[in-house]
Amino acid sequence: MHAIVADADEGRRAALRAELERHGHQVLVAADVETVLQEGRRNQPLVVLGAEVEDGDGVALCRDLTMVPGGDGPVVVLVGYPGDVDVDAALSAGAADVWVLDVGGETISAVEVRVALARYYARLQAENLRVGGEFALMRQALDLSGTGFVLTDPRLEDNPIVYANRSFLEMTGYPEAEVIGRNCRFLQGESTDRDQVARIAAAIREGRPASVEFVNHRKDGTPFFNELHIAPIRDERGEVIRHVGVQLDVTAYRVRDQLFALEQRARQAAEAAERRSSFLAAASPALDARLDLRSTLESLARLSVPHLGDVCLVETVRSGEAHRVALSAVDDALERKLLALPSTSPLTPDAETALARVLRQGRAEVVDGRGGPVVGDAVDETLREHDGRSGRRWMLVPLRARGRSIGVLALASLAEDRRYGIDELALAQDLAGRAALALDNARLYEQQVEVARVLQASFLPDRLPEVEGLELVTRYRPADAAIDIGGDFYDVLALDSGKTALAVGDVAGKGAPAAALTGLCRHTLRTAWTYEQEPAKVLEVLNRMLLSERRDRGRYATVVLATFAPGPDGIETEVVCAGHPAPRVLRASGEVDVLGERGTILGWRDDIELRPVDGVLRSGDTLVTFTDGVSAGDEGGPLSEEALHRELERCAGRDVDEIAARLQAAAVRAQVGRPSDDVVIVAARAV
């Protein structure tokens, strides 16, 4: 069976096409008038035209279709909403019928279209039977509909069938002679739902429409799911003269719906799994974002609410006590109440709370709040006062990492519709596992930071000594700022001779090995100053020590030593460089001088070359010593020789603290895009 649909109304066109295809039609949606004219004159199809088609008028197109000389021509139906189509004009143009649909515009449903069309079919039959004019055309249209269609006469005894179309006969397997004059109940059987039959009977008695779905049986006994829609047809006096019944075999759709339901459940499960994966994928970076124990704990609590619970408590164990280290709640007022509670509680071996049990056994639990204390009296009572419920559900999940217990993640549900099952517990355990690892990493990092802090404190002086005639300022920035430890060092100490010694050094390597060598160099220099008074002699001592430690490759260092002593013209200075960049002197006049000559690197060979250089710092002159994290002179470094001089010249007239700060900022900027290096700056100004 062929059908053509041409309608400018997209929603109505889609509904019509869906219904026609549902009834077995091969549907062509025509995009233009020419296509309708060409296809409509073949095989006498059913042509359904909208009041407006894509490029023309539906009534005019109907006239063109039905004015074909010879043959029966197509069955043409005009459709529209109230006011869209002139019914008289359409019928005059040769339309078999005009369907004015008042069922919701673009939101029309398939059932509404089906019932509406059935009403029009019934009206056509009643009118044509009465006038006897176009009954053959009406039968042809109904047979082409593809839907089981019957009319019953309630004025006759037992409301018998007075008309059945070809689709009904094909659906049921009964010939017309065995259908006409019988009540529709002959299709029923043992598996027919009697409640649905009663609904249909009540609707017929009361003269109202109804829709049901039940099992009917074909003539050969085969059951099928029958979707039945009935509606009364009334005459001009309002009396019911017919009942129309539209029947569809929906067995295939019923199976499809069952498959669809299974597919929906599978899709929902997949979506839930995807949401869990997305949550965990987002949670992991948030937990690892900062290697700070408190921040990690707070991130864990915030991530868990409201995705896993309405309240989240993170409890850790220390010295036989549970410590509440983080919490979060969906209700701000409740969170403030919980924060005000004591954060510690004893964990005795016989403690009866669910929290203590999970800590002892190391197994996750879903706990009913009615079964006894969960976290502790204070928390349990606060939650009970908040909403008056005692049957709250909890999930308690151990936090374990690297074989050791860290604490418990406690999640409570305040919402009536939140349930904790296997999936929720598995998700909480997965989050707890990731969180525990992040917490352990943060704990290890804090230990590392503390070790680095103590180690670094041994490399640098606690405070700078007060030196008559000198103002001293230092700046220190390690390359690895995360652990605050580096391979550059400085030291200032008062000598027995009355002089003040300054040392700035840089050892080979990075990280912990460089830090160990840094400590060795600094303490060796301090020891050497106790029995050597000349900077060159002190450096020779350090060189011998490094050579004796050559069991490891790369134990080298560059150092600059300077001594300061008051003199008649200012501060007399002696500078010795061992492979280290020479200091610069920013004169009070704004000129920049180099004070010192680069000698031999320490730890490389026995016979080192050192060239002491003397100078004088007059009032306002500033001696600036630094490591190669600032500049390495002609050998490179972040700041070139010219850039270093320009930066110092710009500092003319500034105080010594600002000179050191500006030089450090320039060095850090210059390290962008290249491997970072430690930065040490010591500035000494004669005052």
Image (spheres, helix red, strand yellow):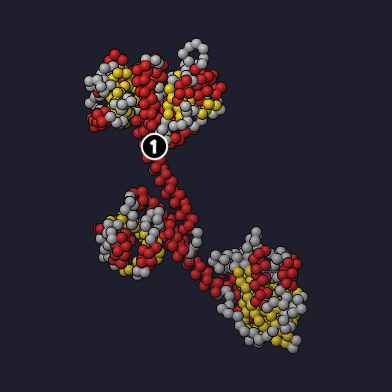
Residue 156: give x, y in percent of width and height. Answer: 24, 20
The secondary structure type at the circle numbered 1 is helix
Residue 33: give x, y in percent of width and height. Answer: 55, 24
Query: Against 532, is 608 above or below?
Result: above
Give me the residue at 48% from left, 25% from top.
49
The image quarter containing residue 460 is bottom right
Query: Against 346, is 58 above or below?
Result: above
Give me the residue at 36% from left, 20% from top.
127
The image quarter containing residue 297 is bottom left
Work out whether residue 666 can be spotted: yes
Give me the residue at 25% from left, 22% from top.
155
Residue 63: give x, y in percent of width and height. Answer: 51, 20
As shown in the figure, which amino acid type bears the numbered disc 1?
Glu
The image quarter containing residue 347 is bottom left
Residue in front for this viewpoint, 117 or 553: 117
Residue in front for this viewpoint, 624 or 176: 176
Residue 621: give x, y in percent of width and height. Answer: 72, 80
Residue in front for this viewpoint, 649 or 567: 649
For label 1, count other residues whose C-alpha is less than 10 Å away and answer few (under 14), some (14-19) or many (20+). few
Give me the residue at 29% from left, 13% from top.
177
Residue carrying label 1: 263
- In which quadrant will I find the C terminus? bottom right
Query: Against 428, is 160 above or below?
Result: above
Work out whether residue 170 can be spotted: no
Query: Against 186, is 551 above or below?
Result: below
Q: Is residue 197 left or right of residue 678?
A: left
- In which quadrant will I find the N terminus? top left
Q: Is residue 274 left or right of residue 413?
A: right
